Amino acid sequence: MNATAEHSGADVVTETAASAWVLEVADNISVAISQYEMNHIDESSGLIKVPKAPVWCDHVMLWKNQVVPVMDFIKIYDPEYRSSDVAYDSIMVAIVRVFDDSEQKINYGAIRILQPPVLEKISNKQASKKQEIDQKWNGISVSAFNYKQTVVPVLDIKSLFGGSLEH
């Protein structure tokens, strides 16, 4: 979407903006995904523990007859929760679309969130420089932007649910 603003008579400046869902995944930690990757918000009560799975993705849920992995950033990035067992009797998740390489088939992934996500218009002026992005997001983010005095990484959903995350 392009917004056009006029400056000093004949000069025209075009600013590009896109919509992104901002997801709060831990206290003071937010991530973003494309507006087209968001599929559904669910209050899940039927999570299934997966033995020997990485701590950040050790639960799955059943949704639309598919087994959906649940990514839990709070277990990675919030040290107070890292060693404790987060209560999974009822959590909120954002269910996201994960396209295969041919973009013909849609799979799903879920991201644990603390509150309902917010759809925001993000402009080029909000873009963050690469050195401003925390190193912990390397390999699973494609970019970042400034939002409410913090740098928010834009997740690479295909890498997140199709690649390997090392921690």
Image: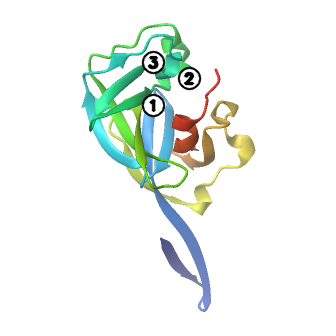
Return the x and y of residue 78 as percentages of the image width and height. Answer: 53, 20
The kind of residue tagged 2 is Tyr
Report which residue position mark 3 lands on. Answer: 58
In the image, which is nearer the foreground, mark 3 or mark 2?
3
For mark 1, what is the residue? 25
Give the quarter of the image for residue 159: top right
Residue 138 in view in this figure? yes
Q: Residue at x 66, y 37 (%)?
A: 139
Q: Is residue 98 above or below residue 109?
A: below
Residue type at the position of mark 1: Val
Element on which disc 3 rests: loop
Secondary structure state at the residue bearing disc 2? helix
Query: Which of 46/152 is in front?
Result: 46
The answer to the question of whether label 1 and label 3 lie on touching residues, with beta carbons closer than 8 A, is: no
Q: Quadrant of the C terminus?
A: top right
The foreground one among 102 and 17 is 102
Q: Check if mark 2's residue and mark 1's residue have beta carbons within 8 Å.
A: yes
Q: CA distance from mark 3 to mark 2?
A: 15 Å
In which quadrant of the rendered view does residue 125 lie? Answer: bottom right
Question: Residue at image x 72%, y 46%?
Answer: 130
- Mark 3 crowdedness (10 Å alpha carbons): few <14, some 14-19, many ≥20: some
Q: Image check: 27 left or right of 141?
A: left
Earlier-in-chain disc, 2 versus 1: 1
Which badge, 3 or 2, is on the more N-terminal residue? 3
3D distance between C-alphas at marks 2 and 1: 9 Å
Q: CA distance from mark 1 to mark 3?
A: 16 Å
Residue that label 2 marks: 77
**Residue at 34% in and 13% down:** 87
